[in-house]
Image (tube, rainbow, N blue to C red):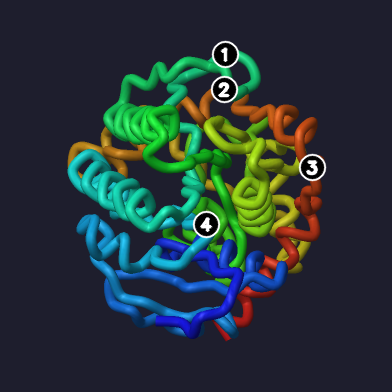
């Protein structure tokens, strides 16, 4: 474990969001302990400690959170296994944070709302009909109930589809767009490429969660972290093409019927089919509650895409 000195925050999960949160906290002068199952990580953020824990075990989660002022839930499980593996992970972390006396900040997504007409705001009811949205809604409800009961201090920060350094398989740009553009292949997307969609830059997501972790008035509520203005997929891909310098990208947009058909043989496509509503209509996130309480700083998409493309280019090179 880390040497005894304050302040300490724990980041549970070492995927792209966990890395971004750790880097943000370190930049704020916090001491950071990163936690994953193995206790190993390629290229960890300089200055962060590493700890191994099975976070489904409340005792192990409590040990991982020991001494922390704030624990940030940034862990995830395979996309095809959410209903089976998210509940025990969330329950272990909730109990572990409670035993350790740590404030818990949950990095959530927007799936619990289900299909929505109009901008997404925090007062929408949990109306998801798909299995991934239902499990996210149940976890959020359990966390807020634990806060109301006085078991653990909780806040929830939600973001839309994210992109940025280290976000590969978990990101539209990182999995099917930027690598393809760098290799001269068509970019692959789904749904309607000309409807507005909120995309969240990972560093903005991390900044939002770190702010929630530092503010008492954030506790017991759901917040949408700030994101730059909504763009269409076509507009976002044009920014990628500009940074890659390849001329206009060729776009292969899979319509809904094809995604559903592929889902008959591909588990990942079957899961994506459940979320097609995000890509067939405007999907715009309102973060005015956060902006009014804490202010809102976002990275312009052009700048965020530049950094993301540079990261992918360096990895490919």
- How far, Cα to Cα, is label 1 from label 2? 8 Å
The first of marks 4 and 3 along the sequence is: 4
- Mark 3 element type: loop
x, y (%) of residue 227?
Answer: 70, 42
Q: Are marks 1 and 2 in contact (CB under 8 Å)?
A: yes
In the rendered image, which residue does mark 4 sit on? 70
The first of marks 2 and 4 along the sequence is: 4
Going by the image, does 101 lie left or right of 61? right
Residue situated in front as seen by the camera: 301 or 239: 301
Q: Nearer the viewer, mark 1 or mark 2?
A: 1
Residue at 71% in and 28% down: 289
In the rendered image, which residue does mark 1 sit on? 117
Q: Nearer the viewer, mark 4 or mark 3?
A: 4
- How far, Cα to Cα, is label 4 from label 3? 21 Å
In the rendered image, which residue does mark 2 sit on? 281
Residue at 28% in and 77% down: 38
Going by the image, does 155 lie left or right of 145? right
> Which of the labelled discs sits on residue 296, or is there none?
3
Callout 4: few (<14), some (14-19), or many (20+) C-alpha neighbours within 10 Å? Answer: many
The first of marks 3 and 1 along the sequence is: 1
Callout 2: few (<14), some (14-19), or many (20+) C-alpha neighbours within 10 Å? Answer: some
The first of marks 3 and 2 along the sequence is: 2
Q: Are marks 3 and 1 in contact (CB under 8 Å)?
A: no
- Mark 4 element type: strand
Q: Which image quarter is the N terminus in?
A: bottom left
């Amino acid at each position: 474990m880390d040497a005894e000195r304050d302040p300490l925050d724990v980041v549970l999960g070492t995927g792209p969001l966990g890395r971004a949160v750790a880097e943000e906290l370190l930049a704020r002068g916090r001491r950071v302990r990163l936690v994953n199952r193995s206790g190993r990580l390629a290229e960890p953020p300089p200055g962060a400690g590493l700890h191994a824990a099975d976070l489904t075990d409340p005792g192990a989660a409590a040990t991982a959170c020991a001494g922390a002022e704030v624990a940030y839930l940034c862990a995830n499980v395979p996309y095809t296994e959410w209903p089976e593996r998210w509940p025990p992970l969330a329950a272990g972390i909730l109990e572990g944070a409670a035993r350790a006396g740590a404030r818990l900040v949950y990095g959530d997504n927007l799936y619990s709302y289900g299909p929505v007409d109009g901008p997404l705001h925090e007062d929408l009811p949990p109306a998801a009909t798909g299995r991934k949205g239902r499990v996210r809604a149940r976890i959020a409800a359990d966390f807020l109930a634990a806060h109301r009961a006085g078991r653990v201090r909780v806040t929830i920060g939600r973001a839309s589809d994210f992109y940025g350094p280290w976000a590969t398989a978990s990101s539209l740009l990182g999995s099917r767009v930027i690598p393809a553009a760098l290799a001269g292949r068509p970019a692959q997307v789904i749904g309607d490429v000309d409807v507005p969609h909120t995309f969240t830059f990972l560093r903005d997501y991390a900044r939002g969660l770190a702010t929630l972790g530092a503010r008492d008035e954030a506790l017991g509520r759901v917040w949408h972290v700030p994101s730059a203005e909504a763009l269409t997929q076509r507009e976002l891909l044009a920014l990628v093409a500009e940074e890659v310098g390849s001329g206009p990208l060729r776009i292969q947009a899979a319509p809904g019927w094809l995604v559903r058909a592929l889902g008959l043989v591909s588990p990942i496509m079957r899961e994506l089919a459940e979320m097609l509503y995000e890509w067939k209509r405007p999907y715009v996130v309102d973060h005015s509650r956060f902006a009014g309480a804490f202010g809102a700083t976002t990275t312009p998409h052009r700048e965020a895409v530049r950094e993301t493309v540079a990261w992918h280019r360096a990895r490919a090179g």
